[in-house]
Amino acid sequence: MEVLITTGLVDSDRDCLVEAFPEVRFRVEAGPCAPVCEPGAAQVLFCDRMPPDLLDRAPALEWIQARSAGVDHYPLTEIAARGIVLTNGRGAHGTPVAETALAMMLAFSTGLRYLLPAQSERRWIRPSVAPKRFELEGQTLTVIGLGDLGSTLARKARGIGMVVMGCDLVQPTDTACLARFVASAELDGALAAADHVALCVPLTPQNIGLIDARRLGIMRRGAYLYNMGRGALVDQAALIQALETGALAGAGLDATQSEPIPPDDPLWSAPNVILTQHVGGASPHNSRRVTDLFSQNLHRFRTGYPLLNVVDTDRGF
């Protein structure tokens, strides 16, 4: 069996794979100096992204392990037509993404959003910042999407005293960290009740523009929006208008419509926005977590057991 790895792993994690599966041939083509991947006879691909023509060049491919939780950038229709199994990295990125979202909330509530730039400019702004401070404890956070990212954020937010509402298509089995669960059909009510709204859903055709001008208008005046998913979940022009008119107090965006953001994009100068340039999922522990997941799945693949995190290509997650 041949496995092609095109995602960057720490050397020690890669070595653990080789040691655990001595009968498997691992071919690594990852890093800035790696050649354009040639799948050859590989039956398994472990990757971040796929070159658009890779499927045409991979006649033996049976299974693709995506490093990311989101798979909207994969050719799902073609993968399904070929009968290839696609699994994602759900479970590997919840902690850093949740902590990024909490950092944004704390930056707004403590005034760090204003104090850090003032420090670099040597400006004393205490009189204007002190009245803007508030406490997250007791405030309501609506988490849209209760997969790994959303459930981890809900748990951590509850830990600092926030009242957490969760919204998803299906109610999760564990709702201990939620003050209330609402079905996706009741999303508008969950938006209206929130001081903070966090998007943690995958990007699917049904979710494009999920937060549009109408739903931004439903949110409380002075509320905050955080996009931890994909840029296309939010109508960016409508968001900027809501920020400029003061309808929203602020926004924390890990994902944006264009990445990288063009220098002339009005998002750079929109009032009270934190842009984290899609680093929310980055962590020194990611290599170990995704390697552990892939190792479990590789063992299952070789022994005929069902794989973990199989993606429904029709639903997109």
Image: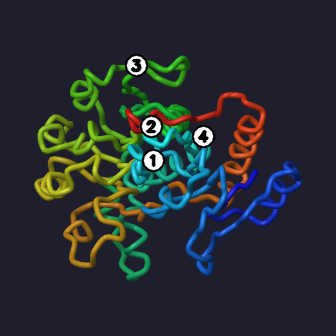
Residue nearest the observer in this picture, 17 or 35: 35
For numbered disc 3, what is the local secondary structure? strand
Characterize the local packing of mark 4: few (<14), some (14-19) or many (20 or more) Cα atoms within 10 angstroms: some
Q: Which residue is mark 3?
A: 180
Estimate the spatial distance between the alpha carbons at disc 2 and disc 1, rounded to whole Å: 7 Å
Give the residue drawn at x 54%, y 17%: 173
Q: Which residue is mark 2?
A: 317
- Amino acid type at image mark 1: Val
Q: Which residue is mark 4?
A: 91
Estimate the spatial distance between the alpha carbons at disc 4 and disc 1, rounded to whole Å: 14 Å
Q: Which residue is mark 1?
A: 71
For numbered disc 1, what is the local secondary structure? loop
> Percent from the top left, x then y, of residue 106?
45, 51
> Percent from the top left, x then y, of residue 8?
65, 65
Estimate the spatial distance between the alpha carbons at disc 4 and disc 2, rounded to whole Å: 13 Å
Going from the N terminus, do you reach mark 4 or mark 1 first?
A: 1
Q: Which mark is residue 106?
A: none
Give the residue drawn at x 41%, y 54%: 73
Going from the N terminus, do you reach mark 2 or mark 1 first?
A: 1
| Front: mark 4 or 2 | 2
Characterize the local packing of mark 3: few (<14), some (14-19) or many (20 or more) Cα atoms within 10 angstroms: some
Do labels 2 and 1 touch, CB within 8 Å?
yes
Q: Is residue 161 above or below residue 265?
A: above
- Amino acid type at image mark 3: Arg
Characterize the local packing of mark 2: few (<14), some (14-19) or many (20 or more) Cα atoms within 10 angstroms: many
Quadrant where the image shows the C terminus:
top left
